[in-house]
Image (cartoon, rainbow, N blue to C red):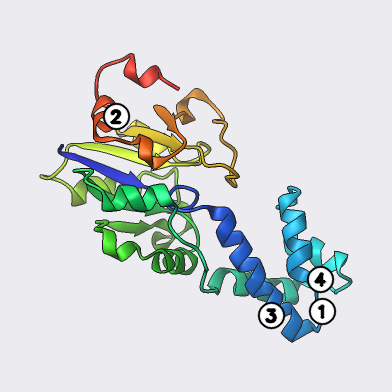
Amino acid sequence: MNITIVFDLDDTLYRECDYVRSGIRSVDVWVQWQLGVYGFAGAATRLWNAGHRERLFDTTLAEIGAAADPATIAAMVAVYRDHIPRIRLAADARAFLTGDHGCGLALISDGFGVTQRRKAGALGLSRYGFDPVIFTDDWGRAFWKPHRRAFETVETAHRGRSRRFVYVADNPAKDFLAPRALGWATVQIDRARAVHSRTPPSDAHRADIHIRSLRELTPRRVEELFDPAPMRLRA
């Protein structure tokens, strides 16, 4: 097909809420060991599910009667980011990656580098032929999406192999601006219970099409992404 499909990681190839739960469990062990306090995991999970995403650790410690000083919070954040996650590929992602899609593959993911590498390792992504795998944090926070550098790097890596690129991701606030500017096709995957909003801040942030499962990303539909309008007007 002479097409490269480039994937985001969080809430694209697996459910990010699973990572959150995994991290909370690891922090819960630390809290029990270091602070001698119990009930962190249950309280944090309940607060997260209720939509308390900012300062979650501070709020949880206050609820279970523990001090939330800056040093303690910093240590908890380090445990969360550094833990070995218990996550797995979404079933549709595994089916796509092991199927006969006929496309080149690459990965572009934001987030703290150590954290994202641990996720990739837990998901076994090395077996699926992503080339290149780009963690934008390796270049510094300034190069996180929507910066173009990662997308231009993929184009360079696939020069001579692909002339058409598709970016599949979940977060319209940052994911689609750069690839759209470079002429890529864009696909927003809307998984249930996704962490980030599905609503684009402007028309420039919109993806070409929306899907709910990678099973919808058939070879025919990938080809159709590069057909003339009105194909790109579909929801």
In the picture, residue 194 is in which quadrant? Answer: top right
In the rendered view, does 128 fall on the left or right side of 82? left
Decide: marks 4, 1 in contact (CB < 8 A)? no
- Three-letter amino acid code at the position of disc 2: Arg
Decide: marks 1, 3 in contact (CB < 8 A)? no
Frontmost residue, 33 versus 78: 33
- In the picture of the structure, the residue carrying the numbered disc 1 is 37
- Three-letter amino acid code at the position of disc 4: Ala
Mark-to-mark CA distance, 4 and 3: 14 Å
Dot 3 crowding, Cα within 10 Å, few <14, some 14–19, many 20+: some
Name the quadrant of the C terminus: top left
- In the picture of the structure, the residue carrying the numbered disc 4 is 68
- Three-letter amino acid code at the position of disc 1: Val
In the rendered view, does 78 fall on the left or right side of 31? left
Question: Where is residue 30 shown, x and y percent of the image?
Answer: 69, 80
Dot 1 crowding, Cα within 10 Å, few <14, some 14–19, many 20+: some
Mark-to-mark CA distance, 4 and 2: 50 Å
Dot 4 crowding, Cα within 10 Å, few <14, some 14–19, many 20+: some
Decide: marks 1, 2 in contact (CB < 8 A)? no
Question: Where is residue 73 shown, x and y percent of the image?
Answer: 72, 71
Q: Quick one: SS at disc 1?
A: loop
Name which of mark 2 and mark 3 comes first in the sequence. Answer: 3
Mark-to-mark CA distance, 1 and 3: 10 Å
Whether residue 124 is visible: yes
Q: Which mark is residue 89?
A: none
Name which of mark 4 and mark 1 comes first in the sequence. Answer: 1
Mark-to-mark CA distance, 4 and 1: 12 Å
Name the quadrant of the N terminus: top left
Name which of mark 1 and mark 3 comes first in the sequence. Answer: 3
For the residues carrying marks 4 and 3, which lies nearer the camera in this image? 3
- In the picture of the structure, the residue carrying the numbered disc 3 is 30
Q: Which mark is residue 221?
A: 2
